[in-house]
Amino acid sequence: MKPASDPHPNDPWMSLRARFELPGDPGGAPLSYLAGHSLGPLVRGAHLLIEEELEAWSQMGIAGYGKPTRPWMRYAHDLRPALAQLVGARADEVAVMNSLTVNLHLLLARFYVPRGQRRKVLIDTPVFPSDRMAIASQIAWRGGDPSTDLIVIGPRPGEWIVHPDDFEEAIRRAGETLALVFVGGVNYLSGQVQPLGRLARVTHAQGACFGTDLAHAIGNVPLALDRDEVDFAVWCSYKYLNGGPGAVGGLFVRAPDPQAAPHPALQGWWGHEEQTRFRMGPVFTPEAGALGFALSNVPVFSTAPLGATLPLFEEHPFARLVERREALIRSTMDRLEALALPGITCITPMGEGEHGAQLSFAIGPIWPRGEELIRDLASRGIIADWREPHILRLAFHPLYNGLDDADRLVEGLAGINRSGR
């Protein structure tokens, strides 16, 4: 599809949009893609990278594992520095592998170690279902009872966000019964950013481990996992990193001493040290750092698109991306507040550092809801998504969204309100 035309010709960022393939309507007219919090669009350079690997497979077969450029044996290694920069870590603390929930299980097996009364896990809610399912199953696997060993801290009555003060109080109250705290860096429903460093330090003061799900945070908000003393993190790559559907995920394991990274509890051949891996020995010797948690070789075709999208973040300082994102959000919110549309309420906190690119709105019963609202927005050229019970979610990604998208969204919501459709 062609990049959208921009009625704001003086916007210097719009040249970036040409590096993405954005969806269009049946007639080919470009749409405002505001669903990057769920699935990012295609980066144009991904075509070439995937085609190169298909050609290598065709022409080289198994020799592709050792080819001079991007050998499959070490295919994801070159991606680690860029990912480490995005999460605020060293490259040896980061690995590219598996999907988010597989990585979460691998890290829970290492970092959730219940002993005596110290066996409880504290999470926030609403939490993405797969996180809660993984944690509950790990508790049960270790002989615990999720109904008593899983502590859930939620929003105050009538609110949508979990206040950091409430989180801290729950951690302190759990005290010596606490084994692990696990929180979303950015909440999938409300778009709220949690202060990871603040919560990690309170957790460590109670003698527990601290982990985070960065699915909605990586590539969206500034991260400093080492500085914030986060013990482990997992993420997917198909949202703000634009890695494509089913893109390979990643993980972080903090190791203050690079030579003393935590060893995995569950072992796989690809986590064995590279220099002796093909001696095919029976004894596991972990690769240094986060790579020791690997199980299998990297899926090349679902990893290749990251080679096209990560350079975009390297080319543009993250602080400038944040400034751009904030300009788009301010433009949107200022105009919506001026319109004062009834029955639509932003539930995303708007304070500095409290949100990323995502805006979430509670939709009242006077509006079309669910798939009907999503269809109505699409008919006006806007791609967003819906989450139960009645939340409209959208996001402004600074790499491909512009002021024209903010204009279209505001005008589309106003039009739906006027027409009742």
Image (cartoon, rainbow, N blue to C red):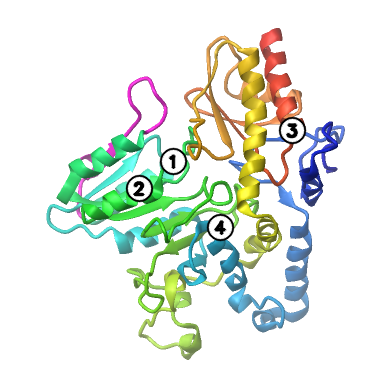
Q: Earlier in the sequence, mark 3 or mark 2?
A: 2
Three-letter amino acid code of the residue under disc 3: Leu
Q: Which residues are magenta?
A: 143-162
Residue 335 locus on image (x, y percent) = 67, 20
Q: CA distance from mark 2 to mark 1?
A: 22 Å
Is residue 270 rendered to the left or right of residue 238?
left
Residue 280's place in the image compared with 198, above or below, is: below
Residue 318's place in the image compared with 28, above or below, is: below
Q: Mark 3, mark 1: which one is toward the viewer?
A: 3
Q: Mark 2, mark 1: which one is toward the viewer?
A: 2
The residue singled out by tag 4 in the image is 86
The N terminus appears in which quarter of the rendering?
top right
Q: What residue is at 62 percent from the left and 37 percent from the top? A: 326
Q: Dot 2, crowdedness within 10 Å: few (<14), some or many (≥20)?
A: some
Q: Is residue 347 visible?
A: yes
Q: Dot 4, crowdedness within 10 Å: few (<14), some or many (≥20)?
A: many
The C terminus appears in which quarter of the rendering?
top right
Three-letter amino acid code of the residue under disc 4: Leu
Return the mark for residue 198: 2
Q: CA distance from mark 4 to mark 1?
A: 22 Å
Return the mark for residue 128: 1
Q: CA distance from mark 3 to mark 4?
A: 25 Å
Q: Dot 3, crowdedness within 10 Å: few (<14), some or many (≥20)?
A: many
- Identify the secondary structure beneath mark 2: helix
